[in-house]
Image (cartoon, rainbow, N blue to C red):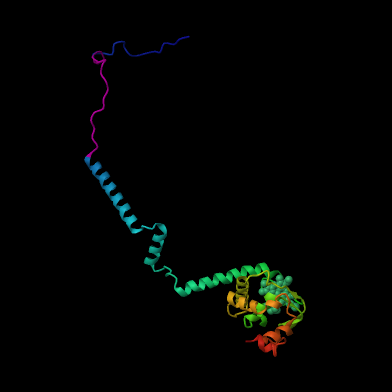
């Protein structure tokens, strides 16, 4: 079924339509961009380029450098570390590694806080053996202990392992530097050379654990029973 659309137009559209040039090709008239617009665009390009150029010249090392520069401008910059600060950072690292080794080799018995185990393992925190002249704790670690030893008014009679085979001079130095400065202790650092000297002096006896506090007293003059434990507790 076809539907013829109803049309109101007359068949003839009039003279204007009859005059149409069938060969006419549409074209676009030349329509130039107005010059003020071109001028603004040009100015923006120059301004953008200049900004980039000067910003790059201001921060040749990139963002980190710019942050430093800003901090300096605000007066919040951290000054470059001094020689002393660098040395102290190195010492901190030595001690931190000692702390990690302490965790590996000592903390299971002496506890992470150095308090020991009541009646079984003596404390390292506040122990006069730890803070004595460095030879004493070095000798204890190298040979171990098997015999009664009194620490902070309590006598222990267990077995401290012999570690001269397990630990290097460097590891012992790090562990003891940490332990001597940890918790309430404040004794000096221990060097690898000091450990080597004590090790060399003990050659024949390295495998024989110290027979308790009296053996250490005989060798190092450290009293096996402190003269006045209460006085010693308050420096
Ligand atoms: C297997 C458990 C054990 C381990 C591991 C151990 N110790 Fe001991 N330590 C002892 C015992 C037990 C004594 C006491 C020995 C005794 O009673 O004869 C002792 C005694 C000591 C002493 C002398 C007493 C005192 O309290 O000051 C020092 C110093 C010491 N240990 C340091 C260390 C360090 C540092 C390490 C790690 C390198 C370590 N010990 C690892 C069990 C251990």
Q: How many marks?
A: 0
| Percent x, y of residue 75 | 39, 69
| Percent x, y of residue 54 | 31, 55
Along the viewing direction, whichever of 140 and 63 lies nearer the viewer: 140
Look at the image and say whether residue 26 sits in the magenta stretch: yes
Q: Quadrant of ligand 1?
A: bottom right
The residue segment tinted magenta is 16-34
Look at the image and say whether residue 219 sits in the magenta stretch: no
Q: Is residue 148 left or right of residue 164?
A: right
The quadrant holding residue 2 is top left
Along the viewing direction, whichever of 134 and 74 lies nearer the viewer: 134
Q: Is residue 213 left or right of residue 17?
A: right
Q: Residue furthest top?
A: 1
Q: Is residue 126 visible?
A: no
| Percent x, y of residue 71 | 40, 65
Q: Which residue corresponds to the image point at 59% horizontal and 68% vertical from the top-left?
A: 97
Most prominent secondary structure in the magenta stretch? loop
Q: Which residue corresponds to the image point at 51% horizontal and 73% vertical from the top-left?
A: 88
Quadrant where the C terminus is found in the figure: bottom right
Q: Residue furthest bottom?
A: 227
Residue 73 higher or lower than 62, as above or below: below
The quadrant holding residue 61 is bottom left
Residue 95 higher or lower than 215, as above or below: above
| Percent x, y of residue 55 | 33, 55
Q: Is residue 228 visible?
A: yes
């Amino acid at each position: 079924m076809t539907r013829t659309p109803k049309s109101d137009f007359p068949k003839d559209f009039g003279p204007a339509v009859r005059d149409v040039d069938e060969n006419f090709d549409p074209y676009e008239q030349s329509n130039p961009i107005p010059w003020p617009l071109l001028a603004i665009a040009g100015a923006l390009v120059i301004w953008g380029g200049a900004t980039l150029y000067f910003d790059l010249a201001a921060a040749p090392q990139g963002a980190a450098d710019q942050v430093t520069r800003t901090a300096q401008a605000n007066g919040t910059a951290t000054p470059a570390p001094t020689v002393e600060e660098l040395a102290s950072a190195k010492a901190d690292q030595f001690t931190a590694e000692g702390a990690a080794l302490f965790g590996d080799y000592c903390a299971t018995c002496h506890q992470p806080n150095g308090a020991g185990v009541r009646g079984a393992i003596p404390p390292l925190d506040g122990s006069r053996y730890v803070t004595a002249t460095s030879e004493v704790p070095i000798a204890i670690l190298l040979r171990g202990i098997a015999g009664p030893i009194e620490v902070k008014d309590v006598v222990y009679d267990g077995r401290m392992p012999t570690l001269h085979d397990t630990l290097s001079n460097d590891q012992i130095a790090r562990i003891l530097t940490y332990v001597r400065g940890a918790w309430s202790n404040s004794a000096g650092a221990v060097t690898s050379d000091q450990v080597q000297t004590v090790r060399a002096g003990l050659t024949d006896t390295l495998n024989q654990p110290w027979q308790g506090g009296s053996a250490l007293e005989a060798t190092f003059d450290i009293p096996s029973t402190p003269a006045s434990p209460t006085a010693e507790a308050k420096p």
